[in-house]
Structures are given as structure tokens and as C-alpha cells.
Image (spheres, helix red, strand yellow):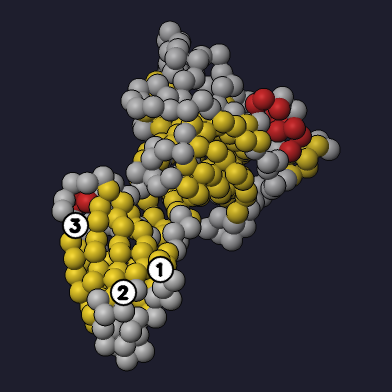
Amino acid sequence: MSIFNILKSGRVQNNSFMMWVICCLLVTSFLGLTSTAFAQSTATVTTDKLDYMPGEHVIVSGSGWAPGETVSLLFEESPYIHPPQTLYTVADGAGNISNSDYLIEDHDLGQTFTLTATGLSSGLVAQTIFTDGNPAGNLDQARNGGVGDTPISPVDWVNGNAGEQNSHYIEGQSIPYRLRLTNLSIGSHYVDIEWDISHSSRNAIDYITHYQRIAETVSPLLGFSGSFSAPSTFAIPTPIPTETILGNPQPQTSFGSLPASERLMTIYNGTITSLTYINNADGNLGDLNAAQSATRMRINFTASNDTVVFAWGGHIGTRLDWGVGNS
């Protein structure tokens, strides 16, 4: 398992409140790549990571080799750009090997490496795979035209703020967001997203929804090049933090009143396998009684391409749900 920490902060201003949309992005790859033995070999070879950054050394280890024999380590990259490189190590008395001479360089970005270890005396062979994928994430939010201006449709995608000078969202609508992850390996990953449910003692983005909940057209792939699959969706779970307002549990009542089609997260070039609320930095799932609190969600997904796009909406808390002066 390899973990990539990609800091991605985005603050969005919407009239009376500020919102942290993504506090940090964690992309974890579960590639299921284990050492593969050949020719009835009991020998193994593995690396300390499944994915490396430029400038890092690949730490190779293994066991089951003939004591004292020389083991060749053949590094081959795909797609082919540079010739294979062979290093050598000598097994110790217990048949264990180690080597840390192979360096990942800047030009290796996006490459997949096959490491084949061969015992020069025993003929034993073992193999493993690692990458220099360097996953990255970019968060955009939508601007639909300033208050009193001609609406923008389809909406513009930007990294900057969405305020009354460039957007005209109202309470109860959902601000569209999209997150593009690049340089992913094919397979299973997860990403954590976070948003403020309470800011300065007011309800902010109380839950997330489908991205299309405004009059303007929202096109999550607008401006992107490359090939993308048809969208796939996954039902967003009911938010957990709750407060009783006029006899109604909120925001659960508000969320449940939306059509099922508006309670979906969308992915392109992949499949969402689960959406789960997890503890935030304060160690809870969100506190509606706190002056400042956030909700964090983990998106587990399977990537079918090295670029994956997610799209969702952030529901703007409304006085109809929370009472006058509370949103």
C-alpha cells in the first residue's frame, strides 16, 4: 500500500459564510501487486513501496535465495523510454537479499517498473512491480455569473472564490464541484473530501448532493482533453450530525426530501465502491453545535484510467431548514 498526501485547500465565499471544501486529499493505491514466483521458486523479491516520487531510492528486499549467491536485479520500465538497468546483490547466509541503489529520476514520472530478480547460481526467479505515478488532484468550483449579470451557462470552472461578483447562488441550491485526479494507477484507491457544515456559528454546506441543482448547465468535463467513460453514480449516504429544528431532524429531513436523482455522486473513468463518513481533524463526524466544524467523507473507488473526475454539489444551508439567522 502506498499513500500520497496531496494538500489541496480551497476556500469558497458565498455571501455570508466561508467554506473549506477540501482540506486535504489522500489518495491510497491498493494495487495488489505481490512478488510472483516462477519455475517453482521459493525465492521472493519486493520493494518497500508500490509507488515512488522522483529522487527516492527503491529499497529492494527478498528471501529464499541460495546463501552466498549473486542475485541480479533487472529493472525494466513501461512504456519503454530508457534501456533496462541491472544491479547486483549477494544473498546473506540466510538467503536474504537487499539493495537500495536504484534511483527514481524526474523523467520516470508516469512509468511502471518491472523488477526481475534472478539467482545466478540457483536459477531461482522472482518478480514484482512498482510505479512512479505521482498522483495529483485539482479541485474546481463553478461560477454561474454575478448577481444582476447574465447567467453563465454552461458554468465556468475555476479554482478561485465564488462570491456575489461572479456567482448568484441562493440558499437551498448546491454549488457544483469537480475533482480531477491524475497519474493514477489502474485499480483501487480512495480519496477524502471535507467541507464546513458550520462556520462562525452558522450552518454552511450542510450536506452534499448531485452537481446539477441550479438552472445553469453544469458540464463536469468541460475544458478537459482526453477520453472519458460514461458517468457512473453512487448514492450519497444520509448525513450523520443532527440537530432538531422545529421538531425535524436536520439536515436529514432536508436531505431526504430531495429526489433520489439529486442524492448521487458522479465519477468518470471509474466506479465508486463506497462513500463513508469518517472522523474529521477534531475526531468526530461533525458537530452542528460548534462554531466551526467540518464533515469528512472517504470515497473508495476503482480507476479504469490514469485520470478520474468526480462531480458533486455542496448544498447551501437555508433558513427554511435552520431558521432565520442560522445559515
Q: Are marks 2 and 1 in contact (CB under 8 Å)?
A: yes
* Residue at image coords 42%, 10%: 149
For the residue pair 327 and 36, the one nearer the viewer reads as 36
Mark 1 vs 3, N-terminal side: 1
Horizontal arrangement in the rendering, residue 290 relative to residue 152 (left or right) = right
Disc 2 to disc 1, C-alpha distance: 9 Å
Q: Position of residue 234 (x, y in %)?
A: 62, 35
Mark 1, Cα crowd under 10 Å, few <14 / some 14-19 / many 20+, is few
Q: Which residue is mark 2?
A: 123
| Dot label at residue 39 | 1
Whether residue 277 sits left or right of residue 63 in the image: it is right
Q: Which residue is tagged 3?
A: 84
Q: Position of 120 compared to 211: left or right?
A: left
**Alpha-carbon span between mark 1 and mark 3:** 23 Å
Quarter of the image that includes the C terminus: top right
- Residue 113 location, quadrant: bottom left
Mark 3 element type: loop
